[in-house]
Structures are given as structure tokens and as C-alpha cells.
């Protein structure tokens, strides 16, 4: 009986010891996990340049635990657009919304109604809230299919860029249209980070200058503060310029006046349609060529008469110059020809005649 009681007591003590040991091990494991989590959390370290003061080197470093909730930086510039750069999310839509892309476009148009096209373009710019950055209109050419040309560089709100590009067809026949985007997200974020870093450095340098008692230290700190402030202003100007480019997209437009607009019909499929189209184009080209020749002749007849008279005079002079050497050569040849004596010729003729008479008498 005693042995059974002793066995039960030992068993209870063993179980209690195991429970206590399990609790101790669980507590230690939890503490180690917390320390490992804190140690493995990445930190963002910002290191500033060293500033020598009074023979000693001062350096400032700022670290921020990335485990803390990130705060989206706010726009701090006076540009026309201030889209704050927010932290990335898991959706592609949010990622694209955070991208900073500068859009540019080029459009080439032709129209038979040039004045109406210019008016329509000005109205389109006004309707979409844009403005004309530059505008050039060139005059008429008589010997070309193109009569007048207009070159526009316009700025439109970035969110209306695609709509403006699509509405270009209402101004005239679109010959060419292309657009491109330049992603400056990385540069923009780098500049923002650099500005924040420089501002922290500026505050630290100001605190050091307040604590400095030596004139040499104050002068060194003031010089460094001026350099930091200049760099901050330079980067902020770049960011403001980026904001303007992001807020308003640029479109280059070329409008060409023509007497026959390019047909926008689909490409002919049958042989008969292709032959008919080629024949129509040949007639138009021939008519245009004849018209251009007539217009050119009407505008150049004075020059034609003047230069024609000069050419005729030159030709006559050349012919006359060639005729004189021929006459002189003929005269020289006739002078060198031998002269037969007249008497010898006459006596021989008389002898011949007398011989003929004697023959007749016989």
C-alpha cells in the first residue's frame, strides 16, 4: 500500500515538473521571436556629409524604422499640378495612378478649308482648358499642292490628352498621329527624398551653429548651410517644372491646306476599283500639272520674253561669227586657182573649127 502511494506521489511530481518546464520554454521562445522580428526589420539610413569644425568631424545620420506606418509625402511646391506621391498598393490601377508620366503627341492634318480649321482648333483648345504655347502660319505657294501651313504647339490638361487627340479628326483629315509617354516616377521620388534629406540636414546644421562658440566653426557651418539651401532650391525648381509638365501635356499640330483632300476611304479590294482609283488619280495629277504650268507661265512671261530675246541674239551672233571665216576661206581658194592663157585656148579652138570644115568639104 505504501509503495503505491509513493509511486503516485512521484508520478504527480514528475508531471508537475514537466508542466513547469514547458511553460518556461514557451516563454523563452516567445521572447526570442520578438527580438528577432525587431532585429530583422529593415531601417532606412540617411548619411550626411561630414563637416569639419575646430579640428573635429561632425556627422549626422537619421534612421527610420520601416516597420512604422509609412506616410505619403505631401506636395510642397507651387507648380500648376501637385499630385502627391502615395505609397504603392496591390492593385495595378493604383500603381498606374501613382506613376508620373509626361505625355506628348504629334498630329499632321490637311484641309481644304484652312480658315475654318484654324477657328475649329482654337475653339477646341479653349473647350478643353488648354492654351497655345506657340503658333505659326505660313503663306501661300503657287507651285505646290500645299497652299498654307499652320504649326501649333499646344498644352492641354493631362487628363484630357486622349480626348483631344481623338477630336483632331473634327478639324481636318488626319494624315499622321502619334503619342508617347516619358515615365519620370523614379526621378521624381528621388528628388523628393533628396529634398527631405537636405532639409533635415539643414536643421541639424542650424542646431550645430547655435551651439558653436568659435568663429571658425560658425563660418564653416554657414558655408555648408548655404550650399544645402542652394541645392534644395535647385531641386524644388526641378520638381515644380516636372509638376507643370505633368499637369499639361504637349501636342504639336501641323495643318496643311490643300486643293484636294486625301481620300479616307478604305483600300479598294477589287481590280476594277484599283484601276478606277488609279485612273482618277492620274486625271487629277495631270490637271494639277497643267494648272501649275499655266500659273507658272502667267507669272513668268516677262522673264521668258527677256531671256528668250537674249538667247536669240546670242544665237545670231554665233551664226554670224561662223559665216565670216567661211567667206574668207572661199576667197582665198579662188585666188590660188591657176589661170589658163586666153590665146592658147582661142588658137586651139580655131584649129578645131578648121578641121571640122575640111572634113565637111571632103
Image (cartoon, rainbow, N blue to C red):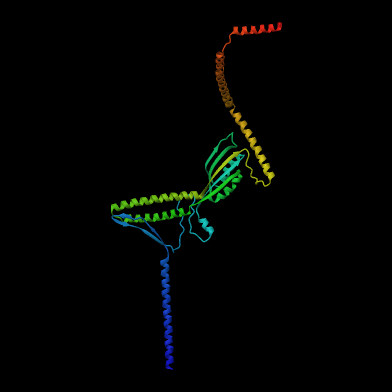
Q: Quadrant of the C terminus?
A: top right
Q: Quadrant of the N terminus?
A: bottom left
Is 96 situated left or right of 7 in this image?
A: right
| Residue 283 screen position, x and y as percent | 66, 37
| Residue 30 screen position, x and y as percent | 43, 73
Is 185 situated left or right of 116 in this image?
A: left
- Looking at the rendering, which quadrant does residue 314 occupy? top right
Residue 263, placed above or below residue 342: below
> In this view of the protein, can residue 220 be seen by the observer?
yes
| Residue 359 screen position, x and y as percent | 69, 7
Q: Residue at x 42, y 87 (%)?
A: 10
| Residue 109 screen position, x and y as percent | 58, 43
Residue 96, placed above or below residue 34: above
| Front residue (pair 192, 45) | 45
Is 131 situated left or right of 346 in this image?
A: left
Q: Residue at x 41, y 54 (%)?
A: 194
Q: Residue furthest bottom?
A: 1
Residue 217, placed above or below residue 342: below
| Front residue (pair 193, 119) | 193
Q: Residue at x 43, y 83 (%)?
A: 16
- Looking at the rendering, which quadrant does residue 274 occupy? top right
Residue 145, placed above or below residue 18: above
> In this view of the protein, can residue 127 be seen by the observer?
no
| Front residue (pair 25, 127) | 25
Amino acid at each position: 500500500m505504501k509503495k503505491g502511494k509513493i509511486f503516485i506521489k512521484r508520478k504527480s511530481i514528475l508531471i508537475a515538473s514537466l508542466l513547469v518546464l514547458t511553460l518556461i520554454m514557451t516563454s523563452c521562445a516567445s521572447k526570442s521571436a520578438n527580438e528577432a522580428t525587431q532585429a530583422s526589420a529593415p531601417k532606412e539610413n540617411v548619411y550626411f556629409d561630414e563637416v569639419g569644425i575646430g579640428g573635429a568631424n561632425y556627422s549626422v545620420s537619421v534612421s527610420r524604422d520601416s516597420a512604422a506606418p509609412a506616410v505619403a509625402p505631401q506636395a510642397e511646391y507651387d507648380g500648376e499640378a501637385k499630385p502627391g506621391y502615395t505609397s504603392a498598393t496591390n492593385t495595378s490601377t493604383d500603381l498606374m495612378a501613382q506613376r508620373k508620366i509626361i505625355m506628348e503627341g504629334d498630329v499632321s492634318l490637311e484641309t481644304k478649308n484652312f480658315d475654318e480649321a484654324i477657328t475649329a482648333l482654337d475653339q477646341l483648345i479653349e473647350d478643353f482648358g488648354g492654351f497655345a504655347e506657340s503658333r505659326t502660319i505660313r503663306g501661300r505657294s503657287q507651285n505646290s499642292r500645299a497652299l498654307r501651313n499652320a504649326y501649333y504647339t499646344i498644352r492641354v490638361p493631362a487628363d484630357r490628352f486622349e480626348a483631344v487627340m481623338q477630336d483632331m479628326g473634327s478639324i481636318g483629315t488626319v494624315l499622321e498621329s502619334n503619342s508617347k509617354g516619358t515615365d519620370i516616377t523614379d526621378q521624381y521620388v528621388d528628388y523628393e527624398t533628396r529634398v527631405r534629406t537636405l532639409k533635415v540636414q539643414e536643421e541639424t546644421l542650424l542646431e550645430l551653429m547655435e551651439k558653436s562658440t568659435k568663429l571658425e566653426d560658425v563660418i564653416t557651418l554657414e558655408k555648408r548651410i548655404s550650399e544645402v539651401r542652394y541645392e534644395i532650391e535647385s531641386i524644388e525648381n526641378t520638381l515644380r517644372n516636372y509638376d507643370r509638365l505633368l499637369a499639361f501635356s504637349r501636342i504639336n499640330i501641323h495643318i496643311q491646306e490643300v486643293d484636294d483632300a486625301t481620300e479616307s476611304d478604305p483600300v479598294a479590294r477589287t481590280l476594277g476599283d484599283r484601276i478606277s482609283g488609279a485612273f482618277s488619280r492620274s486625271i487629277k495629277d495631270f490637271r494639277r500639272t497643267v494648272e501649275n504650268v499655266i500659273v507658272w507661265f502667267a507669272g513668268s512671261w516677262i522673264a521668258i520674253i527677256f531671256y528668250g530675246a537674249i538667247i536669240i541674239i546670242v544665237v545670231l551672233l554665233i551664226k554670224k561669227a561662223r559665216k565670216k571665216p567661211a567667206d574668207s576661206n572661199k576667197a582665198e581658194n579662188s585666188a590660188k586657182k591657176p589661170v589658163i592663157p586666153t590665146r592658147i585656148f582661142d588658137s586651139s579652138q580655131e584649129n578645131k573649127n578648121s578641121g571640122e570644115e575640111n572634113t565637111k568639104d571632103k
